[in-house]
Image (cartoon, rainbow, N blue to C red):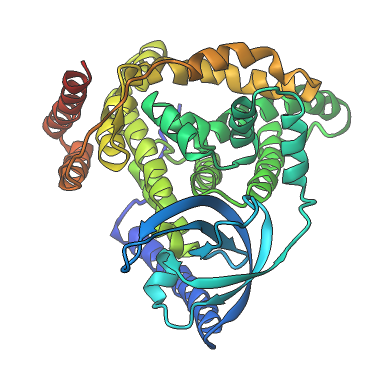
Amino acid sequence: MLERVSLFRNTRDFFHLLILVFTLFSLSISYEFYNYKELTKFDSQLVDATVLKQYTKTKLTKKGKLKTYQVLKLKSDAGFVFYSTASKKLQNIKYKKIQVEAWAGKISFYEYMHGFYCFSKILKIYDDTSYKTKLNTFIDAQHSNANISLLYQALFSAKQLPYKLQQLFSNLGISHLIAISGFHLGVLGGILFFLFKYPYKFLQNRYFPYRSYKVDSFWIVTLLLYSYLLFLDIPPSLLRALVMLIIGFILYDRGMVIISMQTLLLTTLLIIALIPRLFFSVGFWLSVSGVFYIFLFLIHFKEWSRWTQFFLLPFWVYFLMLPFSLVIFGNFSIYHPLSVLWTSLFTLFYPLSIFLHILGVGNLLDSSLLALMHLDTKPITLELSKNILIIQVLLSFGAIYKKSFLTLLLLFSFSFFIYAIYNVT
């Protein structure tokens, strides 16, 4: 068997990549800056946006009175995200598309890229006739419990969950299963490859034996997955997964190493170059971190059997991602470590739930989900310094090259597990 070659054979290859990335980044950031100038050209601007979040907030005014109002998180059609406020009497318009007059004339370019607050006035609430809404209505009709319906809508259409449900799943350590990510894309890709295989083989043997099943099936499945991304408004973690899938196949087809940090680096740089605002996305970097630790495991323990890798990898990812989870979210419960089990079972649950909903009997698993959602998690909140992540990242990079750093990384990450268990018991 021929040995696969590395992506970057020398410094010159890496330098060429940097030139490509810099060129793409320059074009992308120039386009973003043009949109920024258009938005801030006048004191106010008309903006079409989708309401991602809507919640009520109360604060004490300078005169000592309580003021209640609603906060809206909006994503414009141009891609930028901003917050605004509205009257407490505003109807529920969450997930609807609206037109607002936004006073964003004085924001900086950094604020435009990162997310900003501005005053706005709602001018129009559009009739919601999108396919995503129709899908959510189809899902909702199969469930009598509102929370179960919202859970499936989050799984299938990337609909954001209410805060209480987000907290519940965070306490259980399964937020990564509810928010659509590369894990879901991998499961969907596997299902599509399986469904496509036998019809294609049948036709190939009779009409086009000269075609390559691997190449044709890959690009057809990739096109379907990309269509799904567009349907979901391109979540960052899914975009990372799809780009990595394409890069991985191209490298595989050319006899290059796929499981390497070079592949992850190439994917990350290209995505940031094409969509610079993802640099500020926590979800995107958590997705990259998850893949980083999977690759780190497969690189250092590639001599282990497939079954050993399959059994240990979920534990490995759980412990090494735990510091990120505790620092960023701060939630932990006694059920949190069981997320390793839930993740394994989810590989079966996800495709089964899709199949059941297609048949119109998506409620068959509702009782099991309700039992899970009614667990008395008794969560605790841990306030940890963000400097911890600096140490975690430095040890992680060192672990690429030295097994001594790998040992330190494991001990460092596992110590947070011990700390969390000590505080919750």
Give 191 or 329, whichever is nearer the viewer: 329
In the picture, residue 289 is in which quadrant?
top left
User: Where does the image place residue 58, in percent across and percent down from the top left?
Assistant: 41, 54
User: Where does the image place residue 3, in percent across and percent down from the top left?
Assistant: 40, 33
In the figure, is residue 360 to the left or right of 404?
right
User: Where does the image place residue 369, in percent across and percent down from the top left?
Assistant: 56, 17
Residue at the image point whose x is 31% and y is 35% from the top: 325
Q: For the N terminus, which image quadrant?
A: top left
Residue at the image point whose x is 45% and y is 63% from the top: 277
State the count of labels: 0
Q: For the C terminus, which image quadrant?
A: top left
Q: Is residue 20 visible?
A: no
269 over 173 or under it: above or below: below
Residue at the image point whose x is 45% and y is 17% from the top: 342
In the figure, is residue 409 to the left or right of 289?
left
Give 100 or 289, whichever is nearer the viewer: 100
Q: Name the residue at the bottom extreme.
A: 42
Q: Name the residue at the right extreme.
A: 207
19 over 13 or under it: above or below: below
User: Where does the image place residue 157, in percent across and percent down from the top left?
Assistant: 65, 40
Residue at the image point whose x is 39% and y is 78% from the top: 108
Q: Is residue 388 visible?
A: yes
203 over 310 or under it: above or below: below
Give 170 or 22, whichever is nearer the viewer: 170
In the figure, is residue 41 to the left or right of 339?
right
In the figure, is residue 288 to the left or right of 296?
right
